[in-house]
Amino acid sequence: MKIYIGSDHAGFYLKEKIITLLQGEHYDVKDLGAFSFDNHDDYPDHVFPVAQAVVGEKGSMGIVIGGSGQGEAIAANRVKGIRAVVFNGQYERNDGVEAPDEIALSRDHNDANILSLGARFLPDDVALEAVRRWLTIPFSGDERHVRRIEKLDREN
């Protein structure tokens, strides 16, 4: 599986760690920048190429990293065919019960094809484990989920 990855300055160092992890697990990784730390770069410049590459290559997936992951997901989701989700850690619900596993549901129910991470919110070990899990969870293919994704892909 080919994995496209990109980040701005806030996610630059986490991106390098994720690339090392993925290469160690024999994924085909394509780094789309940033290629050096530049405190003044802009996340859309690194996110749009990832989103366009994922749409252009069936079966590929993408990872984008920024400070919060929010802007990165917004940018990626502007590209038709992208279903980007943000992960900034697993939380408990207000009643103290752990929330459903976001990483699993984003793949199983939504067939998410880009994972957006907030480097300022996630410890490196949590981010790396999230990436590892996200890449191994398949889309369920359940009819109700397929139907919903098809509605997302329609022209509005």
Image (cartoon, rainbow, N blue to C red):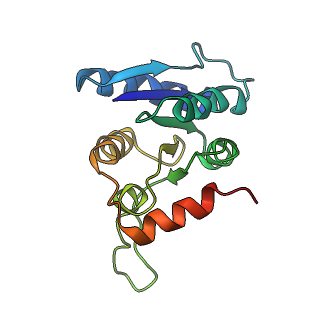
Return the residue found at the far left. Answer: 25
Please indicate whether residue 44 sits to the left or right of residue 81 in the image.
Answer: right
Q: Residue 124's spot in the image, x, y percent?
A: 38, 38
Residue under the image location 33 percent in, 21 percent down: 20
Residue under the image location 43 percent in, 56 percent down: 89
Q: Is residue 109 above or below residue 121?
A: below
Please indicate whether residue 107 sits to the left or right of residue 66 in the image.
Answer: left
Image quadrant assignment for residue 153: bottom right
Q: Residue 26's spot in the image, x, y percent?
A: 24, 22
Who is closer to the viewer here, 93 or 104?
A: 104
Q: Is residue 107 above or below residue 33?
A: below
Quadrant into which the N terminus falls = top left
Q: Residue 34's spot in the image, x, y percent?
A: 60, 19
Return the residue found at the far top. Answer: 36
Return the residue found at the far bottom. Answer: 95
How many tags in the picture?
0
Q: Is residue 153 above or below residue 76?
A: below
Who is closer to the viewer here, 75 or 78?
A: 78
Residue under the image location 36 percent in, 41 percent down: 131
Q: Residue 91's spot in the image, x, y percent?
A: 42, 67
Please indicate whether residue 28 sits to the left or right of residue 50 in the image.
Answer: left
Q: Is residue 28 above or below residue 155?
A: above
Residue under the image location 58 percent in, 45 percent down: 82
Who is closer to the viewer here, 52 or 120?
A: 52
Quadrant into which the C terminus falls = bottom right
